[in-house]
Image: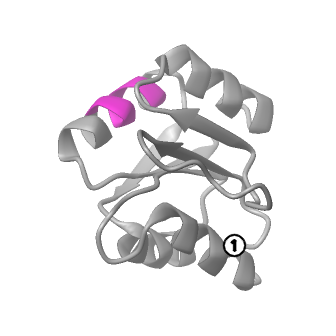
Amino acid sequence: MATVLLVDDDINALNALKELVGQDGYRVTTAGDGTDALRAALADPPDVVISDCMMPHMDGLALMREMRRNRTLATVPMVLVSALVTPPADADLVGFLRKPFAVTQLLDILHRVVMP
């Protein structure tokens, strides 16, 4: 069973995504910001990370950069989600979704990257 790490500082959005992704057969772990996500990913490396972009402490782009610098996490696929920010062209992402998005869009990306 593939593990998805969901990262968002909005607890309601995080819980809704956790439920939907979990129902699709994935094991789901969560974090409320990039700092907690990095800590969680190092302790239990996920198969894919889905992160909001704008968060306190460490945003999604900073999380991506830290993951790419780490030997254990460097190749973990990452999807970035944002209502306002567009990632730079050189961002190492397997997907980008602009909020609001349809859950089917997220699940399509997950299925393309890793099966449940």
Front one among 81 and 28:
81
For label 1, the SS is: loop
Q: Magenta residues: mostly which secondary structure? A: helix
Please, what is the three-letter code of the amino acid marked with disc 1? Leu
Q: Quadrant of the C terminus?
A: top right
Q: Residue 68: x, y in percent?
A: 72, 75
Front one among 40 and 97:
97
Front one among 30 and 27:
30
Identified at 63% across, 40% down, the residue is 96
Q: Residue 35: x, y in percent?
A: 39, 77
Identified at 67% across, 21% down, the residue is 108
Residue for badge 1 = 73
Residue 8 vertical placement versus 91 (above, below): above
Q: Residue 21: x, y in percent?
A: 47, 29
Using residue 56 as the reference point, say whether residue 93 is left or right of it.
right
Decide whether residue 18 is among the magenta residues. Answer: yes
| Magenta highlight range | 16-21
Using residue 113 as the reference point, say whether residue 49 is left or right of it.
left
Q: Residue 43: x, y in percent?
A: 50, 77
